[in-house]
Image: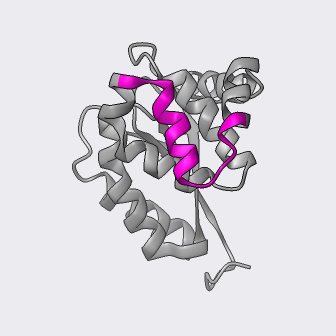
């Protein structure tokens, strides 16, 4: 149940590449938004792996496996904190992160080999492209797309302005 006076929940889609330094930077804004709005703001990670980032597709699939194992958000945040290491070392970082969280690393390895989560990642990416996402992070709230790939300056304030308006209305 939402604690909003109107009973509303606002959805914030965050289009992200888990090997993108800008997405790691955006994590502070996402945490602050979660803190401010609690259950009134449904923050949804949407995968938008950039082809230029070698390990981005594997990272997105690993995040889906972590979600299946009950630690999607925690895995995603830890992985974003290790962007440079992921970019350097690749899949071993995904497995190490899973182990640190007490997840089944063997199942992670199998999921990366059998590609069981690739359709979800592909669907997110296709939807992102369809709505005009070209870089990461990109936010979508209340039908408005806000591109943080060029600059994140002022984006959190803009998201708060839109969320406040939607929650009040």
Which residue occupies 33% across, 58% down?
A: 28
Colour scheme shown: one colour
Which region is colored magenta?
89-106
Left of 147 or right of it: where is 46?
A: right
Point out the image quarter for the C terminus. Answer: bottom right
Which residue occupies 45% across, 13% down?
A: 51
Residue 169 visible in the shown view: no
Q: Classify 53 as above or below 8.
A: above
Residue 99 location (% of width, % of height)? 57, 47
Depth check, front residue: 27 or 65: 65
Which residue occupies 45% across, 43% down?
A: 79
Left of 84 or right of it: where is 49?
A: right
Residue 117 visible in the shown view: yes
Point out the image quarter for the N terminus. Answer: bottom right
Residue 60 location (% of width, % of height)? 57, 32
Residue 160 location (% of width, % of height)? 40, 64
Q: Classify 119 as above or below 72.
A: above
Q: Classify 96 as above or below 116.
A: below
How many circles with numbers are drawn on the protein?
0
Residue 9 location (% of width, % of height)? 64, 68
Q: Does the magenta stretch include residue 62?
A: no
Which residue occupies 30% across, 33% down?
A: 84
């Amino acid at each position: 149940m939402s604690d909003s006076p109107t009973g509303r929940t606002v959805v914030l889609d965050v289009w992200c590449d888990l090997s993108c330094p800008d997405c790691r930077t955006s994590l502070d804004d996402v945490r602050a938004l979660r803190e401010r709005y609690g259950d009134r703001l449904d923050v949804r990670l949407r995968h938008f792996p950039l082809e230029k980032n070698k390990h981005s597709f594997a990272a997105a699939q690993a995040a889906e496996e972590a979600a299946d194992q009950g630690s999607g958000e925690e895995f995603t945040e830890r992985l974003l904190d290790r962007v440079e290491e992921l970019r350097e070392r690749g899949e071993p970082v995904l497995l190490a992160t899973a182990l640190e969280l007490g997840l089944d690393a063997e199942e992670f390895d199998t999921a990366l080999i059998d590609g069981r989560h690739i359709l979800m990642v592909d669907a997110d990416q296709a939807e992102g492209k369809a709505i005009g996402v070209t870089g990461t992070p990109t936010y979508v709230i209340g039908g408005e797309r806000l591109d943080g790939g060029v600059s994140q300056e002022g984006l959190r304030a803009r998201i708060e302005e839109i969320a406040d308006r939607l929650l009040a209305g």
